[in-house]
Amino acid sequence: MTDERTPPSDGRRGRSRRRSRVRPGTSARPVSGRHPSDDPTAIGAVEPGDPGAERTVRPWEVEAAAPTAEDRPRGRRRRRSVASLLADVPEDTVIATRRLTKEYGQFTAVDSLDLTIRAGEVFGLLGPNGAGKTTTVLMLLGLTEPTRGVVRVLGLDPTREPLAIKRRVGYLPDHVGFYGAMTGRENLRYTAKLNGLTRRESDARIDLLLHEVRLEEAADKRADTYSRGMSQRLGIADALVKDPSVLILDEPTIAIDPAGVEELLALLRRLVRERNLTVLLSSHLLGQVQSLCDRVGFFAAGRLIASGPLEELARGTDAMQSVELEVGVDGDPAGIDAIAAAIAGVQSVRPHERDEHLRVVTASTDVAGPLATALANAGVPLVHLRRRGSDLLELYRRYVPEGLDVHIR
Amino acid sequence: MSTSADLPRSDTAPRSARRSERPPSGGWRTIALKEFADHVASVRFLVLLVVIVVAAIIPMYFISTDISGSAPQLSGQPALFLALFVVGSQSVGGVTTVAFAALLVPLVGIAFGFDGINSERTQGTLSRLLAQPIHRDDVVNGKFAAGIAVISVMLAALVILVCGLGIVRLGIIPTPEELARVLSWWLATILYASFWLAFALLLSVIIRGAASAALVGFGSWLGLILFGQFLLPLAASALFPSNTAGTANDYFASTSAQAIFLRISPATLYQDIVTALMNPTTKSVLGVGNLGQYVSAQEQIPSLLTLDQSILIVWPQIVALVALTVAMFALAYVLFLRQEVRA
């Protein structure tokens, strides 16, 4: 994975930020910097024709959601705490949640989620089924109201201004469906019309999108004749019809065969790059999306366990800062032991947990090069050499305790 | 809860921003247009149209034969044109066009509503639809509007067909008063169908499976028609027992209580409305409440009411039917707004 578009923020900073979030001093927000329209009492002072006013203010200073019934008695206190919750949100943030919580009765679907996604970033929200990924996405779009906490998408509160958000955010739901009696093109036209596009501007855009998702030939067939992969591609075109700046994809690779997944990911990669989109994608298929994401967050039982660029997650948590290598040779793996142990930095050599033909070499630094040379010099043909921790599934296992992994209600 | 999520926006935003955020065409209209197109192209529309037209034309055909067969006796009879709708020929067992319509209209209303919301859910289109910049209530409003539009078109076809064939077969031109009565019957029937449409939409919100929603809908319709006229008076007579040893006023009190109870049922309300609208001689639909009314009803000279007088007689019924429809729709609306989007 290239680092060229990885934003300066990293997982560790995110964690420390969370810790400092509730410091009392940060709650003093500069009230004067607020946009007049944010203050309900100042409505008369607003100049409707002033287009610059919206841009000069940091959107994060907009006040929080209307207090819910239980919060109303302490509304003033709550407002200030919202400002402080958003105090650490960087300027170019597109999606921010702070202490976002959603409860269904006794069950907590999302638990104090802090998420920061910056412009141009591809963020992967990874977790098992039922971890609260879809609930989070629905709260971002204002389709479900949070129980507690703050959400800002493009600086707007989804609870208050769902339409403004939905106009600029493309959404591909999990198990996306289309009206079977209409053709793919008609389905897209309907979406365009709901977005207030005229027939003329939408037709050109739809042609282009259908070309990009390679559905030109099927475009005028009924949508109920589409395969799962075609529906998914049409879903991506559908999410892009409104020409969004943010794309939210919920389980985009679900129920597609491996070849289709590869194709879909290639398509997404291209679209995201061409259009400079900010993307939030959720998935429980870790390996499938890792090539697409700049940053990932591990999600389990409603909580974000860890987040950051993949390499950093791979490095960051290893307490010993040690490197583990999987080594396999042609012949008896016991032949590795002595050769590997002789290399400087190697701490241990043990059999692989699952594969009896492999050895796991633990070292304080990356000894892949010296090890390969040593094996070659000893005349032992090397057939397998892999650094551990580069795989999402391994990372996920490391971060998410076993109990959370099998989270079944 | 997403009740406030998609409701009209808060007042804190500048006015200019608010205007620009409204979809230009109005979300509900876009949805209604699409739904209307779907309905008209659907098989169920064709089937129902054929059923309704056949059911309306058969009684009308026989009664027009009867009327033209006995033309000399009937000439000068008031409101003869309306007889096409409300008089049944003996050759078809006295069934009238209006009665057929009353029987079938709930079917039409349910047919265009029972899968309104739940099919979107099972198809996976609901979350996609709601992710577009429309208010959540636009979905219900659009579907309700589309349903009413389809039903109106269907009933208009029926009315025009019966009137046209009637003119051809009888050779008489309806008076403006008669036309106005037919038109008001059309409107009342649309209202009645809207009640069933709202009921079906409510079912489509509550019941996740379209098939079960349809079954419950048709079941309620049959139940109301078959058992409503027995069960409701039964409840009334339990509350206001008719005592044979009592006075005449006791008797009238009991029967009028039964009559009131029957008017909980939209079917009875609609029947009252049609009776008054399509029969200018109808002076009362409620029956008599006491002995004095009974006597005065006996002493009345038969005469024709004007349309506005007829409407006045059943105004309470019209209001009650509107109220029932609104209540059904409001319930569907509120429940849908509070529902979780995810399946």
Image (cartoon, coloured by chain):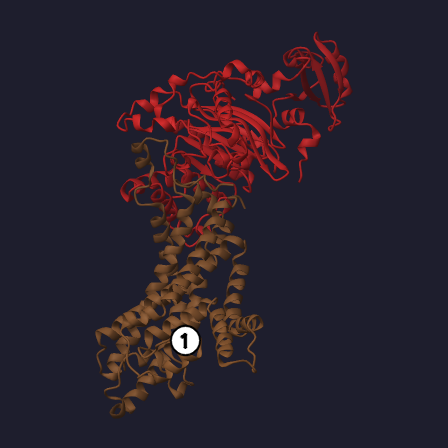
Chain colours: A red, B brown
Q: Residue at x 24, y 81 (%)?
A: B168
Residue sitting at 44 percent across and 26 percent down? Answer: A63
Q: Nearer the viewer, residue A52 or A15?
A: A52
- In the structure shown, which secondary structural element does the residue marked by tag 1 occupy? helix
Q: Residue at x 51, y 39 (%)?
A: A260
Task: Identify whether B72 is placed above or below B321.
Answer: below
Mark 1 closeness class: few <14, some 14–19, many ≥20 residues within 10 Å: some
Where's residue A316, x and y in %? 61, 16
- Picture coordinates of residue A136 (x, y %)? 53, 34
Whole-percent x, y for residue B189 in the image: 37, 67
Above or below A365: residue A198:
below
* Residue A305: quarter of image: top right
Q: Is residue B194 left or right of residue A107?
A: left
The reply to whether residue A136 is in sight is yes
Q: Does residue A218 show up?
A: no
User: On the image, numbered disc 1 is attached to which residue?
Assistant: B100
Q: Which of B212 and B140 lies nearest the eye of the viewer?
A: B140
Residue type at mark 1? Phe
Asked whether A307 or A223 is in front, the reply is A307
How far across and down, in percent of the image, does residue A318 sit?
Answer: 66, 16
Q: Is residue A156 above or below residue B329?
A: above
Residue shown at 46% from the left, 20% from the top: A5
Q: Quadrant of residue B71?
A: bottom left
- Chain bearing mark 1: B
Residue B69 sits above or below residue B14 on the image = below
